[in-house]
Amino acid sequence: MGQIAGQVAIVTGAASEVAQGIARRFAREGAIVVLIDKDASEATRVANAIALSGGRAEAMCVDLARDGAAAEIAQAVAHAHGGIDILVNAAHAALAWMPLADKKEADFAAAFHDVVMPTVAAMRAARPHMLRRGGGRIVNVGSIYGATANEGITDAITMDGALASLTRSAGIEWARDNILVNYLQPAVPDIAVFKSYIAERGAIVDHLIRNTPMRRLADPLEDIGGAAMFLVSDEACFIVGHKVFADGGQHLVAAAFEPGAAR
């Protein structure tokens, strides 16, 4: 029997490999997983793969930045599966690397429009359905750069700070209803985009990885998915408003993925 067998979990940003790792881990532990993304192809591929391996998953193509979309999704999932137990907000915007002096206000507005506000909407939409189940778990997924910072990604760091503060505030208000909200900051994962970065930068990246405490990249399924699994499990029943670093200690030194190194 899995740790979250029969629970209904929504995972947003499901076109990303990090979100997919979390979804696959939840399905392995018995959850019914609904993968949400405005790009349906990758989310559908992973949902199909989970189903072929014996898990329960489905994909829904939705842009959560659209007004009312989060409430529609929450209602549809609750109607189809009887409720909502878990929400993971793992969507992230594709941001350009450039110094703060060169960024436009629109870059910051896009980060909030595409990530922060959809997270707020998804949390608010899921809450009534969690209340009917006697509580729930929400995990907002940020990045390691909120802790380490770096050059060229001020909008991403600002977005990360907003999500962390949102998590703390919701944690204060919603814990009394047994809806526990926490913040997961994963390390750079071993995914396709980072392999391209290694190929471009060469030995310097290997050096950066070797200088991190655990000397390797994160596995989306076992490392990041495992940390998310802990936060939604009964083992984390007294943890709320907390930042969890699933980063192999990278926040203690420096992130292995350094946008500012391009200058």
Image (spheres, rainbow, N blue to C red):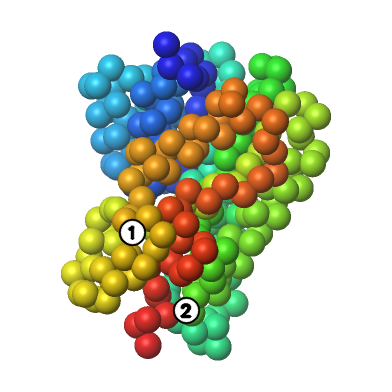
Closer to the observer: label 2 or label 1?
1
- In this rendering, the answer to whether 51 lies above or below 97 is above
Tag 1's secondary structure?
loop
Q: Nearer the viewer, residue 257 or 39?
A: 257
- Which of 7/74 is in front? 7
The answer to whether residue 73 is above or below residue 115 is above
Q: Which mark is residue 215?
A: 1
Up/down of 42 relative to 110, above or below: above
As shown in the figure, which amino acid type bears the numbered disc 2? Gly
In percent of width and height, residue 19 lies at: 41, 43
Q: Residue furthest top?
A: 1
Quadrant occupied by the N terminus? top left
Spatial CA distance of label 2 from label 1 is 24 Å
Type of amino acid at the residue the image marks with label 1? Arg
Camera-side residue of 61 and 232: 232
Q: Which class describes the residues within 10 Å of circle 2: few (<14), some (14-19), or many (20+)? A: many
Q: Position of residue 51 (x, y in %)?
A: 28, 22
Q: Earlier in the sequence, mark 2 or mark 1?
A: 2
Residue 91 seen in the figure: no
User: Horizontally, is 204 left or right of 22 in the view?
Assistant: left
Q: Residue at x 24, y 21 (%)?
A: 53
Q: Residue at x 69, y 38 (%)?
A: 240
Q: How many marks?
A: 2
Give the residue displayed 36% in from the left and 38% down from the top.
222
**Rendered-image quadrant of the C terminus:** bottom left
163 relative to 253 in the view: left or right: right
List the residue tagged with mark 2: 152
